[in-house]
Amino acid sequence: MNGRTDGSATEVKSSSAELLQALAVLASKTVAPLLDGMFGACDGALFDLASGAAGTYDEQRLLDFRRELQRKRTTIATRFVEQLMAEFARFQRPAASSERLNIDELTLIPPEQIERQLMVSGGVSRVRSELQLMLADLHERMLSLVPSAAEMNEADNPFDPGRIAQAFLDACQELESDIKCLRVLCQQFDAHVLGRLGAVYQRGNQVLVDARVLPLLGAAAARGNATPRRDQAPEPVVRADPDPADAVTPMAGAGTTAPGAVDMRGGFGELSALLQRVRGSGSPLTFTGLSPGGGIATAGAVSLGAGELVALLGDLQTGRGWPGGVAGTSADIRSALGSIAARRGALRLGAAEGDVVDIVTLIFDTLADDKDLPLAIQVLLSRLQLPVLKLALNDRGFFGDRLHPARQLINAIARAGRGWDGHEQDAQDTLLEQIRALVEGLAADAQAGREAFAQALQQLQCAIERAEQRAVKLERRTSEKAVADARLAAAREAVHAVMQQKLDGRDLPVALLEFFNADWQRTLQLFFLRKGPDSAEWLDAVAMVEDLPRSLVAPQDLLARGALARVLPGIYARLEQALEHTQGNTVEAQARIEGIRELHRHLLEPPAAVSARVVPIERARIQPPPVIPPRANDRTVTRPAADTEAPRVALSLESLQRADAVAVGTWFEISDSAGSARRCKLSTRIDETRMLLFCDRNGRLVREASRKSFAYALQTGEWRIIEDEPLLERTLERITGDLRRRASAG
C-alpha cells in the first residue's frame, strides 16, 4: 500500500516538474523573441536622438551606445533567457532559495542599480495592474504544482513583470553606457516586452488548464488567504439562451484564454450593466424594433438565440437560402437585421444577445464619427460589421480582451491607415489594396471566427512591416541629408560670424585675405562640424584669425622684430597641424602660406628695406555664407511662411511649449483654406536651425516648418494632432462614457 502511495506521489512530483519545465520553455520562447522588436525599435530611437542631439558629444555618445547594442544584442538575449530559466529553478526550490539568504551578506543597493530599477518600475506597476487577474490565476495554478512555495507571493513568480524586468536589467549589466542611454533602452523594453506580456500569461494559463491544473479556478475561491482584490466572487456569465448549441465558451478561470472570462467582468459585463441602466431611464434603444431581454416587440415575434442569429447572418453574407441572392447587400448591422426581420417577421433577442448587438452597433457608429480615421479606412472598417457581430455573439471576450485578434486587426488597420490621405494615391494604394483584400475576405466568409481574424492580422502585420521598412529607409535618408545640411549651414553661419567680427573692415594684405577665404574658412567649418564649437581645435582655429593679422603688423623696433621671429614658428606649426587634420594641406594652400611667409620675411628685414617694399593691401569685406541649394525633392515640400510675417494672433508661450513637447513620430492632419487636408508625421527635429521635418507614411518629405510657425499652426488649429491611442480602446472608452452620461441623465 505504502509502495503504491509513494509511487503515485513520485509520479505527481514528476508531472509537476515537467509542467514547470514546460512553462519555463514557454517563457523563453515567447518572451525572449520580443527582444528582437525591442532592439530594432531602440536602434531607430537612438538614431533619431543622435540626429537631433544638441552637441557633438551627445551625438557620439548615442551612436556609440547604438553600435554597442548591435554588437551585444545576442549576448544580452542569451543572458536574459538564462536569467528567466534561473527564476523558474528558484521557484521550484523555494526552501533552498531562502536558505541562501544570510543577514551578514545583506548590503545596501548601489544607487545606480536603484536608478535602473526605477526606469522599469512604471511599466512593471502598469502590467501588474492591467493583468492582475491573469497573473493571480497563473500564480495559483503554479503554487498548486509546488506546495512548498505556498509562502511565495505573486511578486516572486517567474512570470511577474518585476522578475522579467530584473532579468533584463541583469542581462544588460555589461553595457558600457550612462544612465541616459539605458533609459532609452528601458523605454523600448517597456513598450515591446512588458507591454506584450498579456499573450504570454494567457498561454501560460492555457498550458495549465489543458493539463487539468485548477481548470475551474475562480479568483476568490481558490485560496482563502488571497489578497483583498481577489476576495470578490467572480461575476457569473450571463446566459440568455439555454440552448447548448448557442452557448459561448464556458468560463475557465479569469486568467485563461477562455473568451468570456476576464472580459465578462472587465468589458462586456460593465457595458451590459450600463445598457440596462440606460433602458431603465427611458432612453431609446439602438434597435427600436427589437426587444432585448425577452420582451415582446410585437405579437408573435420570433425568438432568436445567438447560434441561430449567427447562422442567419452567415447565410445573409453568402446569399445561401435567400431568394434572388442578397449576398453583400446588407453589409451593416441595421440593414442585415432588417432583412432578417423582413423575411422572418418581428424578432426577439435574449438580453445578452441584444446587448451584444447594441454594443457592436455602437462601436461601428462611433468609428464612423471618428475624425482621426480617414474616410477610406472608415469605409473598409464598416465592411467588418457582420463578421465582428458574429464573432462577438460567440466570443464575448472581444469586448474586454485587448489582445483579441479581432480587436488587434481593427487597431492595426486604423494604425496603418492613419497616414493615408487623398494626395498621391497611387503611391499609397499598395497597402490599401492589401487591407481591402483582407477585409473583403472576412466579409465574404460566413464561417469567419477568431482564427480567421488571427490569420488576417498576421498577414496585415507582415504587409505593414514591409511597407514600414521601405518608408523608414527613405525617411532616414531624408533625415540624414536634412541634418547634414542643417549642421553645414550652422557651421557656415558660425564661421561667417567669426570672420565678420574679427576681420570685417580691416585693411589686410591680399595674400592673407586669399588664405582666409580659400583655406581657413574651410578649416573652421570642418572643426566646427567634427569637433564642435567647444573643442580646443575650433577655439585655436578662431584664435588664428586674430593671430595671423597681428603677426603682419610691422614691428616698431629691434626687440619687436625679435619677438615676432620667436612667435612665427609656433604660428606656422599650428597652421600646418590644422590643415593636416582637415585634409587641407594641398599644394595650393602651401603656395598661399608661402605668400604669408614672404610677408613675414619682409617684416623681419631692416626698417629701410621694409619701407622700400610695397605690400598689396585690401579692405576685408566678409560676405554672407552661400545658401544651401534645395533638396532634390523640393517640389514636394511646402515651405512655411517666414517667421518675420506678423501673425494675426500673437503666438503664446503655451503654444511654443506645446510644440516643443510634441514627440517625434506624432501624426498630424493639416488643413488649408480650400478645405483640403493632408497627413504627415514629425520625422526630425533639427536643433541647429530649429526646423522640423514632416514625412508622409511612405517616408517622403512633404513639409518643413520652423519652430515658431509650427507652434502657431498648432495654436490656430491649422495643424491637428491625430490620436495615437489604439482605435478600439478609445472607441470603447467613448461609448462607456456616453452610456454613463445617458444613464445619469435619466
Image (tube, rainbow, N blue to C red):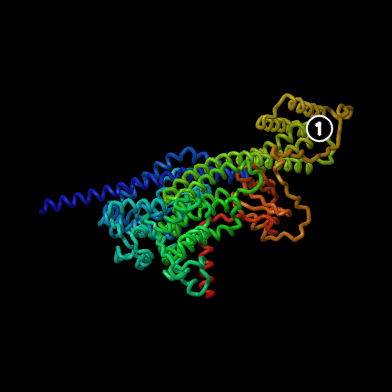
Q: Secondary structure at mark 1?
A: helix
- In the rendered view of the protein, which quadrant contains the N terminus? bottom left
Residue 745 on image: x %, y %: 54, 74
- x 74%, y 60%: residue: 650
For this rendering, which residue is in front, 178 or 203?
203
Q: Left or right: where does residue 107 sit relative to residue 556?
A: left
Mark 1, Cα crowd under 10 Å, few <14 / some 14-19 / many 20+, is few
Mark 1: which amino acid?
Leu
Q: Left or right: where does residue 480 sit relative to residue 28?
A: right
- x 86%, y 37%: residue: 619
- Judge whether residue 681 can be spotted in this image: yes
Residue 606 on image: x %, y %: 84, 28
- Judge whether residue 542 can be spotted in this image: no
Residue 615 image-quadrant placement: top right
Residue 485 on image: x %, y %: 68, 40
For this rendering, which residue is in front, 25 or 395?
395
The furthest residue to the top:
587
Vertical side of 294 occupied by 473: above or below: above
The furthest residue to the front:
323
Total residue callouts: 1
What residue is shown with label 1?
558
